[in-house]
Image: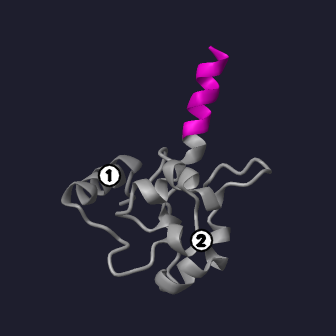
Amino acid sequence: MARTIVDIKEKTETAEERGFNFWTDKMPCWEVSHCTNMVKSECPAFKYPFLPCWEIEGTYCKLDDYGADGKDTSICEMCRVYKTYGGGRPIQLKLMGRGINASLKSLEEIVKS
C-alpha cells in the first residue's frame, strides 16, 4: 500500500515531537557546506533536523537560478554529505511543502493579491 503525504507528515511530526535529531553524532550539512546564518534561517534542513537534508523538499542546495522547484535530488547524489551519511540508499523526499520554494511561492501569492 502506498504511503500518502499525510501519512508521512504524521510520522514526521511524531519524530519531531519526540525530539529525534538525524544529525546527532554527525556533522550537519549546514556545517559541512559552511552555510551562512541567512541561509540557515531559511533552509528547512536547519529547521527540521529530524530528517536528513536529502529527504526534504526545497532545501537551499536543491534550488538554483534556473527555476528549480526544490524536488530534484540529483544534486544530493553528488554531495559529500549524502555520500557520507546516505548509505547509498535511494533518495525519497519525505517532507514536502515546508522548503524555501514553498515559502517563496506563498510570498508571491501575497504580493499578487
Residue 88, image x, y percentages: 52, 85
Q: Establish if 46 lies above or below 91.
A: above
Relative side of 10 to 99, left or right? left
Q: Residue at x 55, y 38 (%)?
A: 103
Task: From the viewer's side, name the closer residue of 17 and 35.
Answer: 35
Quadrant location, the C terminus: top right
Per the rendering, the mark at residue 33 is 2
Residue 34, image x, y percentages: 58, 69
Per the rendering, the mark at residue 7 is 1
For the residues labelled 1 and 2, the Cα–Cα distance comes to 31 Å
Dot 2 surroundings within 10 Å: few (below 14), some, or many (20 or more)?
A: few
Q: Residue at x 53, y 76 (%)?
A: 90
Q: Establish if 107 lies above or below 54.
A: above
Task: From the viewer's side, name the closer residue of 50 and 29.
Answer: 29
Relative side of 65 to 21, left or right? right
Q: Closer to the N terminus: mark 1 or mark 2?
A: 1
Q: Residue at x 45, y 58 (%)?
A: 46
Count of numbered marks: 2
- Asked whether the viewer can see residue 94, the reply is no
Q: Which range of residues does the magenta coloring cover?
A: 103-113
